[in-house]
Image (cartoon, helix red, strand yellow):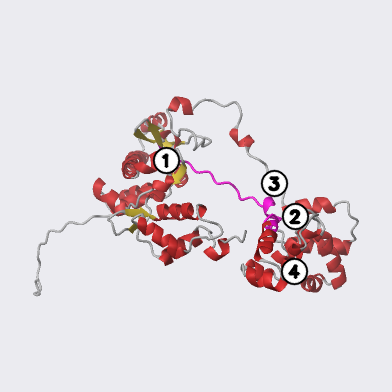
Amino acid sequence: MHLKPGLWQQQTMKLAMTQELTQAIALLQYSAQELTEFLEAKTMENPFIQLEVSEMKALQPKEKAGVRKGRLEKKDDKNWVEHLADHSQTLTDYLRMQLSLVPLNNEQKRILDFLLYNMDENGYMSITVEETAGMCGCREETAAEVLQLIRELEPAGVGAENLQDCLLLQLERMEGVPPLVPVIIQDYFIAFAEKNWRLVAKKLGVDVKAIQEAADFIQKLNPKPGARFHYEQPTYVRPDLTVVLKNDSIEVHLLEDEMPKIVFQKDYFEELASHKDEQLKEFMKDKHKDYLWLLKSLEQRKRTIQRVGLKIVEKQKDFFFYGPSRLQPLTMKEIADELEIHESTVSRAVRGKYMQTPYGTYELKTFFPAGLSGGTEETASAAQVKSKITELVNGESKTKPLSDQEISNLLKEEGWQVSRRTVAKYRDQLFIPSSSKRKRYD
């Protein structure tokens, strides 16, 4: 190290993040929708670039996805969008329709609007009669009368204040209800819900089998009567890659027809090239250079996505032959090392990209599950372990369900070292109740 003042020459190498390089990195991580939006903005900046975007086609993931272009592009006389069901009627609309013939004065209509506004998507009332009366400036009796009108409508259970109230409302309209059922819901609901059935049986002076029979009946009731009117807007994705199975081989295709394309307006460019304005010529030169760099960046993006996709299929071939349960542990570093690129490049290449497979359309990051190491050098992905836990629970004796420790022991016999706590975590993620709550008393 030179500590004295003076002039010294030193040769170093560094990567300069030019505007073009920054653009190439950004293009790689864009999803198809983001890329389209970016290119649309570019056409506003560059008058010599025109954007061509193909119309999105209906996805049929269970068909042999990606079978040759000729088969995929068969014309359909009917627009597939027209086949989507119209679920525009809301719970509030349905309730108002039933009340349309009921004579209500202005005050009752105002209270009705307020109550319907405070009903959640499942049909439960999120406000009390006392609060309604205070906010609407009316008597509690009037608010209660309007609420009762709602509680008498279809579907049975709407207007309830909680789950217990909802179930009781449904029982009031049913015939052939076992005598034990309303008593359990009315007086022992918490103990019953927590499956403390022996205590409930003792209080009622019956055996546990009678509680099980009541539970089977209660399961037929609808805990969310308004849920069937709630529909989320469907989200459509545009796959970047498609996988085709042909006998024992796998083919991977980049869906280039679905990608937005840029076209250079050559005629317009040549028409302006005849002008002698030096400032115009400099502008045209910059825009042409901008187009060439953008074209190069798009080609590089497609090539990188295809290489990463091919390597993913190579590493996860069991998934494509046998299904999602055969997904193997994989890291982005493994892909990066084999392709001799940086791990961050793989991360950008899989972000927001989708692959159409024989089992549906999956985001590329799905193919990078975390792994669990077994004592026998075998590894399993979390998805495989969850699939096995589901299989074990489905095949267990319902009168003597498997505990988390027993499931852990069975997994160890498969060569997977999965602790009891991990089993409990995965079971919760799969919405599988504990063994005590899965037990039947037949």
State left or right for residue 357 relative to residue 286. right
Label drawn at residue 92: 2
Q: Which one is in front in this view, the residue at disc 2 or the one at disc 4?
A: 4
Q: Residues within 10 Å of mark 3 (few under 14, many from 20)?
A: few
Q: Quadrant of residue 8?
A: bottom left
Label drawn at residue 97: none
Return the residue at label 4: 186
Q: Amino acid at mark 4?
A: Gln
State left or right for residue 211 relative to residue 298. right
Residue 223 lies in the magenta-colored region: yes
Measured in 3D between alpha carbons, the distance from the residue under mark 4 to the one under mark 1, in whole angstroms, is 55 Å
In the image, the segment drawn in magenta is 217-242
Q: Amino acid at mark 3?
A: Ser
First of labels 1, 2 by sequence position: 2
In which quadrant will I find the C terminus?
A: bottom right
Q: Residues within 10 Å of mark 2 (few under 14, many from 20)?
A: some
First of labels 4, 1 by sequence position: 4
Return the residue at label 1: 240
